[in-house]
Image (spheres, helix red, strand yellow):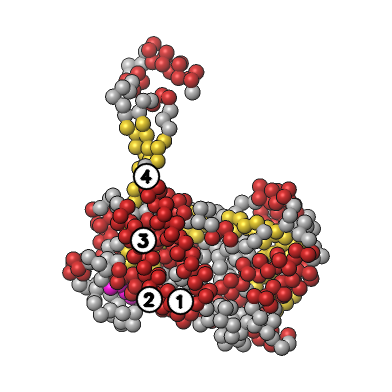
Amino acid sequence: MHRFVSRAGQGSAAWRRAHRGLYHPRMTSSTPAIPPLASLRLLFDAQQRASRAQVEVPLALRRDRLLRVKALLDDNAGALARAVHADFGVRSAQLTEIADLFVLRTLLSNTLKKLPQWMKPVKVRTPLYLQPSRAYLQRQPLGVVGVVSPWNYPLQLALGPVITALAAGNRVMLKPSELTPQTSALLAELIGKVFAPEELCVVQGDGGFSAEFVSLPFDHLFFTGSTAVGRKVAAAAAANLTPTTLELGGKSPCLIDASCAPADLDSVALKIAHGKLLNAGQTCIAPDYVLLPRGREAAFAAAFARAVARLFPVIVGNPDYAAIINTRQHERLQALLVQAAAQGARLQVIDPGALNASDALIAATAGNSSRQMAPVLVFGAAADCRLLQEEIFGPILPVLPYDTLEQAIGYINARPRPLALYCFGSDKAARAQLLARTVSGGVTVNDTLMHIAHENLPFGGVGESGWGAYHGEAGFVRLTQQKPVLVQSKWARGDLFYPPYGKRFGRVIGLLKRLI
């Protein structure tokens, strides 16, 4: 089942008249009317026609669209945070501010500032044999961009790609997650008030509806989600030869090298705990497991426990500690722990507010009705357990000892390339070796998560963690057609290369061979 939720944007009266079957001025997120899937194609067709009718999108219009998004966020930040909280059960407005809204504000600020430069034609040096012609890259919109966003950061990961696509001059159709229905419905309502459907619109539906959505012949399709679903998205897009950007998951390693002094372990553990427990571990670039020198497991566990106590003095009832999104995900995490323990792993539940170990265990298991799951360190996990095979996406952190840096690098390289890699230590030679011999989507040294906050660094995966990158100019270029243009000079002597080929041709080629 699905529903189409949109309200008339500015200048959309003609569109409404032409599509009376799709639009109803009193439609809300609770309206039971369910239009046919054909409505999705009609909406796509309207955007495609608009994109072809206005190929060149001027700076003023692009800025206007970005400023409308900015005003939407500024005017409705509180309502959006409340919707996110309602969808999660527990997720503070402060967490949504820093992890969703602030990231979007910095993206908008940077994009608005640099957009005039990004839009300019890029001059390209002309080789000797083509002179005196000149060449450049003309940056043009692709057309219609589809965006499929996930539930874990339902504002940032929905509107981030949208902002980039609008900056590049594209029309956009956004399909947010059905697992955050209140946030998705509010986005649809707010966007529908300030955008015409042929500019930017939100459509909503379940997995079946998403399958129809990704099968549309977009000019580009942007998907953020799991690797398993990403494979299906890529296959559907391939049928239309639609280029894709896939921001997927991955088991991101966090390596502590031997140069990390015992006195520094508290600082290291604090940064790892913050990266792991932000949004209760429901972050695609969260540290998935820790590699550390053998013999330091107990010291790390103690430092990690102190870090959790500093960040979250209590777990259950703490508004700063997000809930697991739903019962299904909570049960999945419990199943990972049950299997690991059955195969001999030792679980250390960390709940500073618990009176005893039994209370801590309850905070980490299904007995906790708030779904605020206490952090769990896992030691001695079997190599074939699901915990070490699947992306965790929750507050569970396996700790894996290694004997040599070579062994740790071998462990990382024996697995699919991760979305992120984190390393801690002062040994620059060891760091250089790690960075040279591993491949990952991104890296933060002596911290976690921070590379994603750098607007001038591209963000994306590699291999099973995805392909394509966005943020900053990299994202603008990703969603732009860089059309190569060569302007021939009236003084050009291209005829020197025309047939019939003879002695003159031989002399010209001989000269060029010596010059190139």
Identity of the residue drawn at 57% across and 87% down: 369
The label shown at residue 186 is: 2
Q: Is residue 151 above or below residue 47?
A: below
Quadrant containing the N terminus is: bottom left
Q: Which residue is mark 1?
A: 81
Furthest residue toward top: 503
Q: Which residue is mark 3?
A: 66
Specify the principal SS of the magenta part. loop
Q: Which class describes the residues within 10 Å of circle 4: few (<14), some (14-19), or many (20+)?
A: few
Counting residues from the N terminus, which is met first, the one under dot 4 or under dot 2? 4
Question: How much space separates mark 4 and mark 2, taking CA atoms?
Answer: 36 Å
Identity of the residue drawn at 56% across and 85% down: 370
Q: Is residue 131 above or below residue 282?
A: above
Q: Could you tell me if the residues under marks 3 and 1 are in contact, i.e. CB atoms within 8 Å?
A: no
Q: Which residue is mark 4?
A: 120
Report the span colored magenta: 2-7
Counting residues from the N terminus, which is met first, the one under dot 2 or under dot 3? 3
* Residue 498 point in image, percent of width and height: 33, 20
Question: How much space separates mark 3 and mark 4, taking CA atoms?
Answer: 18 Å
Q: Is residue 500 magenta?
A: no
**What secondary structure is found at the residue carrying circle 1?**
helix
Identity of the residue drawn at 37% across and 34% down: 135
